[in-house]
Image (cartoon, rainbow, N blue to C red):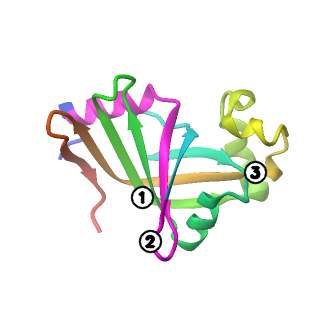
Amino acid sequence: MPKNDALWKASSLLVSDTKSAVLTTADNDGHPHATWMSIVADSSMETVMSITAPDTQKIKNLRENPYGEWMIASPSLESMVYLSGTTRVIEGDEAKSHWDSMPSKSKAYYRHYCDEDDYEKFSIILTQVEKVVYCRPPGYRQTVVYELSS
């Protein structure tokens, strides 16, 4: 499907206007874990980035099973975009440039339990988007907008 069609445009507009999303991960046994996250993503929908503490369930799951799916919803919850793909946990010196590019860190949820400005105390979650699915009621119609060829 061409990246310039109406569904691509609707998906990319929703993603670029959103500052938070639900990340779903699963451990090696397939047990899921979902959590709200502040994100950085743009209309290209190539990557999704977030910051979290290194001792969270999502980081444990991603170390076991490096695949994540992000659900981004319109404010009215009438439209949703799912972005999924291989997800890296980035730490140490490699994390600094990602840390520096994350806006509004002072308002992020993780500040409730860790009020530090030291990038070395956090993990960066970076998903390389391989699939984009657009959903819209009624009937919760799902349309694959883009899928990376194997």
- Category of crowding for the residue at label 2, using alpha-carbon neighbours closer than 10 angstroms: few (below 14), some (14–19), many (at least 20): few
- Mark 1–mark 3 CB contact (< 8 Å): no
Q: Position of residue 69 (x, y in %)?
A: 43, 53
Query: Marks 1 and 2: which is nearer the front?
Result: 2
First along the sequence among labels 1 and 3:
1
Question: Is-magenta flag for residue 29?
Answer: yes
Q: CA distance from mark 3 to mark 2?
A: 25 Å
Q: Which mark is residue 85?
A: 1
Residue position marked by numbered label 3 in the rendering: 122
Residue position marked by numbered label 2 in the rendering: 30
Q: Position of residue 26 (x, y in %)?
A: 48, 65
Name the one closer to the observer, 81 or 43: 81
Q: How many marks?
A: 3
Name the one closer to the observer, 114 or 92: 114
User: The C terminus lies in which quarter of the figure?
Assistant: bottom left
First along the sequence among labels 1 and 2:
2
**Left or right for 58, reference 149:** right
Question: Residue drawn 73% across and 57% down?
Answer: 54
| SS label for mark 1 | strand
Q: Amino acid at mark 1?
A: Gly
Q: Position of residue 101 (x, y in %)?
A: 66, 36
The magenta segment is 7-32
Q: Amino acid at mark 2?
A: Gly
Question: Residue drawn 28% across and 46% down?
Answer: 133
Examine the rendering and report whether any part of residue 150 can be seen: yes
Q: Amino acid at mark 3?
A: Phe
Query: Vertical placement of 150 versus 36: above or below?
Result: below
Q: CA distance from mark 1 to mark 2?
A: 16 Å
